[in-house]
Image (spheres, rainbow, N blue to C red):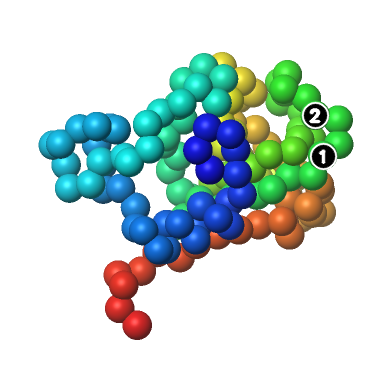
Amino acid sequence: MGCHGGWPYRAWKYFAKEGAVTGGHYGTKDCCRPYEIPPCGWHWFEPYYDCHAAYKGTPVCVRECQRGYDKNYTMDKYYGSHAVKIIGWGKERDTPYWIIANSWHNDWGEKGFFRMIRGINDCGIETLVDAGLVGDGSK
C-alpha cells in the first residue's frame, strides 16, 4: 500500500504472509517488531496508524465506488473512490448507518470519521468488502 495508495486485499495478503508489527514507531528498537515502512505524507497531514476495530473484532476495508468525489464531507452522505474502514454501526432517528474511518486526518468529517446509510448497499458499501480473521497460526 505504501505512500501511493493500494488495494486492501493486497494488504491483507501481505499481513497473512509477513505478519504484523507488534508495536513501536518506525526505526525504534524498543519493541518486538517495529514498523518496517517509514511514514509518508500521502494522508494529507500526517500518517494515520490507529483505528479501533468494532465490527466483529477487525477493521473491515471497503473499496468505495466513484460518484462525485467530495473531500469536504460535513455529516452528510459521502461518495468517494478509495479504501476506508467500517468500524461500527448505529441508528439515528430510525435510520441505520455504518460508522466509517477515513484516513484524511481528524479535522475531516466527524473527527476523521463519517457515516453511510446501512442496509441498502449504497455505493457498494456492503459488497465491496475485504476483511481478515486473525488467528494464532495453528491449523
Residue 135, position as x, y percentages in the image:
36, 69
Marks 1/2: CA distance?
Answer: 7 Å
- Which residue corresponds to mark 1? 66
Name the element at disc 1.
loop
Q: Nearer the viewer, residue 28 or 136?
A: 28
Residue placed at 61% from the left, 49% from the top?
A: 7
Label 2, residues with CA under 10 Å away: few <14, some 14-19, many ≥20: few
Seen in the picture, residue 115 relative to 7 is either above or below; the reply is above
The circle on residue 12 is: none
Residue 115, position as x, y percentages in the image:
68, 37
* Residue 105 visible at all: no
Name the element at disc 2.
loop
The circle on residue 69 is: 2
Judge from the rendering whether residue 128 lies leftward or rightward of residue 23; answer left or right: right
Seen in the picture, residue 103 relative to 54 is either above or below; the reply is above
Furthest-bottom residue in this view: 139
Furthest-left residue in this view: 30
Seen in the picture, residue 8 relative to 68 is either above or below; the reply is below
User: What kind of residue is marked 2?
Assistant: Tyr
Residue 39, position as x, y percentages in the image:
41, 28
